[in-house]
Image (cartoon, rainbow, N blue to C red):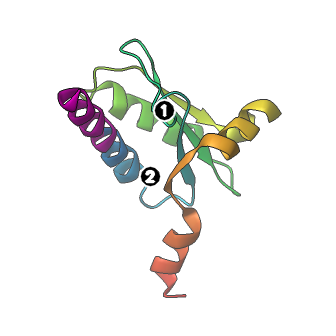
Amino acid sequence: MASENKTREQTLTTLKHIVLQSLQDVPVNVYLFGSWARCEEKRTSDIDIALQSNEEIPVTMVVDLRERIEESTLPYHVDVVNLENASHELVKKVEEEGVLWKDCRSDWETRTGH
């Protein structure tokens, strides 16, 4: 059990690092949601990441993020969802269970000193 928790934490730490590095200059909120956010994942579960922004998220940025994840050593499939194009039900699910990994408001405050 302890090794499973360590592997889980390593997986999420690696993924979070890739995501935050890829999106560091982008005003976007990033959420972990789904079974991994609820700590109910299985070996076959994918990892769900949601992107949310008040500005349009460039498709090329999402494609680049997906490529970086696919090229990583992560042993799980990762779904990257742009909430701008998602159903109301999915947006609500992310709002209810999502774990905020990146907050665009704190990014703005850090960059501007406000």
Asked whether, in this view, residue 82 is left or right of residue 18, the answer is right
Quick check: can you spot residue 11? yes
Q: Nearer the viewer, residue 58 or 102?
A: 102
Residue that appears at 35% across and 14% down: 43
Q: Classify 10 Å Cα crowding around label 1: few (below 14), some (14-19), many (20 and above).
A: few
Q: Quadrant of the N terminus?
A: top left
Q: Amino acid at mark 1?
A: Val
The range drawn in magenta is 1-14
How packed mark 2 is, by other alpha carbons closer than 10 Å (few <14, some 14-19, many 20 or more), is some
Magenta-drawn stretch, dominant element (helix, strand or loop): helix
In-front residue for pair 95/14: 95
Residue 59 placement, left or right of 70: right
Query: Is 30 in the magenta?
Result: no
Residue behind mark 2 = 23
Residue furthest bottom in the image: 114
Which of discs 1 and 2 lies nearer the camera? The answer is 2
Task: Give the percent coordinates (x, y) of residue 82.
Answer: 63, 38
Picture layout, residue 83 above or below residue 111 = above
Q: Position of residue 31 (x, y in %)?
A: 54, 45
**How far is mark 1 from mark 2, CA to CA?**
12 Å
41 or 69: nearer the viewer: 41
54 displayed left or right of 15: right
| 92 relative to 13 in the view: left or right | right
* Residue found 70% across the figure and 36% down from its top: 93
Residue 63 disc label = 1
Under circle 2, the secondary element is loop
Q: What is the quadrant of the C terminus in the image?
A: bottom right
Q: Position of residue 78 (x, y in %)?
A: 44, 26
Q: Is residue 3 magenta?
A: yes
Residue found at the far front of this picture:
1
13 over 36 or under it: above or below: below
